Image (tube, rainbow, N blue to C red):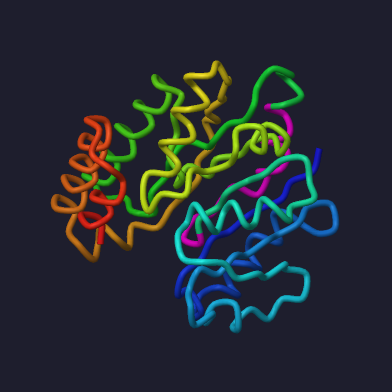
């Protein structure tokens, strides 16, 4: 049971090599593979990659489209979808494999959410997000979702919508009876968006988008709120 790590990127040229090096250290080749999918029309991140063992491809813009494109060329048994501003623990491959070895009926899982910011408001956001995912078993993309490749293909992959593709797929899996395990170990994501937009504004905006999505507002309309 080896892992294909799929990283969708958009305009990450300045930091991509340091990030990919850190991922390779955790998921060494050839046991695992690392696939980076650039959704920028200019292909700036694609052109900046200097590591030879990374599979680099381009696709149309959109995280769902990019992740589906990466999954289509993946060769390993497990697909791990990793954001380019997120880091996993050094024993992540073992943790992921143990999930499947312990329960043959599980279709996938995710890590708990960590945020690289020790301020109290950020820790409250982190705690509430983890409480939600532990209760619902519907993790979001910044928790580094992983799935059996054959199951992902049977599900038809991510729906290619501009936003909420992670929630849509995980909700679809839950409705069809697929079982997901949430690891206690954390997927640590950057707080850069909160810092840029402000904690209160960013958090309220995210809550509003999720509420409107559950109320049936289309992902195309919601995407305008996220920009």
Q: State the residue at coordinates (70%, 62%).
A: 24
Q: State the residue at coordinates (58%, 20%).
A: 179
Q: Would you say residue 198 sits in the magenta stretch?
A: no
Q: Is residue 96 left or right of residue 192?
A: right
Find residue 174 and report its horizontal and vertical position in percent.
Answer: 49, 21
| 173, above or below 123, in the image | above
Q: State the residue at coordinates (60%, 75%).
A: 17
Q: Would you say residue 87 sits in the magenta stretch?
A: yes
Find residue 8 and report its horizontal and vertical position in percent.
Answer: 54, 60
Q: Nearer the viewer, residue 197 or 60?
A: 60
Find residue 70 and report its horizontal and vertical position in percent.
Answer: 64, 56
- Look at the image and tell me in which quarter the C terminus lies: bottom left
Q: Residue furthest right?
A: 30
Q: Nearer the viewer, residue 155 or 111?
A: 155
> Which residues are drawn in magenta?
84-99
Q: State the residue at coordinates (22%, 30%).
A: 215
- Look at the image and tell me in which quarter the N terminus lies: top right
Q: How many marks?
A: 0
Q: Nearer the viewer, residue 128 or 170?
A: 170
Name the quadrant containing residue 99. Answer: top right
Find residue 165 and report its horizontal and vertical position in percent.
Answer: 43, 44
């Amino acid at each position: 049971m080896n892992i294909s790590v799929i990283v969708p990127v958009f305009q990450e040229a300045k930091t991509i090599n340091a990030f990919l090096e850190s991922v390779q250290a955790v998921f060494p080749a050839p046991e695992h593979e690392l696939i980076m999918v650039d959704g920028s029309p200019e292909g700036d991140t694609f052109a900046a990659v200097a590591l030879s063992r990374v599979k680099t491809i381009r696709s149309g813009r959109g995280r769902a489209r990019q992740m589906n494109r990466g999954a289509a060329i993946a060769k390993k048994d497990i697909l791990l979808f990793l954001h380019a501003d997120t880091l996993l623990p050094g024993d992540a491959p073992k943790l992921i494999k143990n999930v499947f070895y312990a329960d043959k009926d599980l279709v996938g899982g995710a890590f708990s959410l960590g945020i690289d910011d020790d301020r109290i408001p950020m820790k409250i956001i982190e705690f509430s997000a983890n409480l939600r995912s532990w209760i619902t078993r519907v993790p979001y993309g910044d928790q580094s979702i992983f799935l059996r490749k054959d199951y992902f293909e049977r599900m038809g992959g991510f729906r290619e919508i501009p936003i909420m593709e992670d929630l849509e797929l995980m909700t679809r899996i839950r409705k069809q009876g697929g079982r997901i395990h949430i690891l206690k170990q954390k997927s640590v994501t950057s707080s850069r968006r909160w810092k840029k937009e402000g904690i209160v504004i960013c958090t309220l905006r995210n809550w509003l988008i999720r509420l409107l999505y559950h109320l049936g507002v289309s992902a195309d309309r919601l995407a305008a709120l996220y920009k």
